[in-house]
């Protein structure tokens, strides 16, 4: 509730100032990272899986991508999947997630002067215990906030990929964790 009121106040103050660019920046800052998912190979219904293992991501772009980016993406996926779904660390049927970075655009790469848009694009693969690919998607993590980019742009786009992975899993049968209700 407090976050919602803060977001509303930020957007309202920008709107009252009359600057549509400020309103847009405020919305992107409050909203955070976003994801775009393009499913290339639809997996079977994933409800049969009760655990997940996120494997290392690789980097197809060489030195253009900062060294820790692949690990950061895998870590964010791991974190979000355990927070937002009912998948566990260990179980009878383990779903494997792997991927590779195929595109990166960050503000410090020259685009920040024209727009705050940042993006990382990954090919993401779902596999079974036999390491057979059962699903494939292209998932883009995006950040359109100058404020968020200045403080932690790579984390923002990595989190966008993680949001996309969670959406893809839940759209294909993985159960979401029930949201906890605050009694305040």
Image (spheres, rainbow, N blue to C red):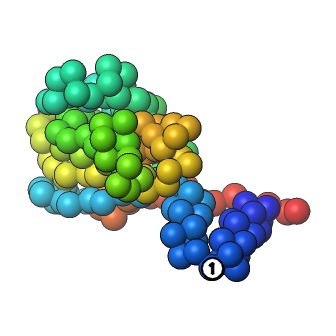
Tell me the residue that label 1 is attached to: 18
Q: Is residue 138 left or right of residue 36?
A: left
Quarter of the image where the N terminus is located = bottom right
Most foreground residue, 61 or 43: 61
Residue at (20% x, 34% y) in the render: 100
Percent position (x, y) of residue 37? 27, 59
Expressed as whole percent of the image width and height from the top left, the position of residue 14 reads: 66, 71
**Vertical comparison of 173 with 59: above or below:** below
Residue at the image point whose x is 88% and y is 62% from the top: 184
Q: What's the residue at 51%, 70% (across, down)?
A: 21
Q: Position of residue 57 (x, y in %)?
A: 26, 29
The residue that appears at 30% across and 37% down in the rendered structure is: 109
Q: Residues within 10 Å of mark 1 (few under 14, many from 20)?
A: few
Taking depth in this image into account, of 91 and 15 the one nearest to the observer is: 15
Front residue (pair 166, 38):
38
Q: Residue furthest right?
A: 184
Image check: 93 left or right of 88?
left
């Amino acid at each position: 509730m407090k976050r919602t009121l803060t977001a509303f106040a930020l957007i309202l103050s920008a709107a009252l100032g009359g600057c549509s660019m400020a309103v847009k920046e405020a919305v992107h800052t409050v909203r955070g990272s976003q994801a775009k998912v393009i499913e290339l190979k639809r997996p079977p219904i994933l409800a049969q899986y009760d655990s997940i293992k996120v494997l290392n991501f690789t980097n197809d772009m060489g030195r253009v991508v900062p060294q820790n980016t692949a690990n950061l993406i895998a870590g964010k996926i791991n974190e979000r999947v355990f927070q937002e779904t009912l998948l566990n660390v260990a179980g009878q049927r383990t779903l494997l997630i792997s991927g590779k970075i195929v595109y990166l655009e960050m503000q410090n790469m020259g685009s920040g002067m024209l727009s705050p848009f940042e993006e990382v694009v990954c090919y993401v693969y779902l596999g079974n215990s036999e390491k057979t690919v059962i699903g494939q998607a292209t998932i883009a993590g995006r950040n359109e906030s100058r404020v968020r980019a200045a403080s932690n742009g790579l984390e923002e786009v990595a989190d966008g990929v993680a949001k996309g992975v969670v959406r893809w899993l839940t759209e294909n049968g993985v159960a979401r964790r029930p949201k906890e209700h605050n009694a305040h």
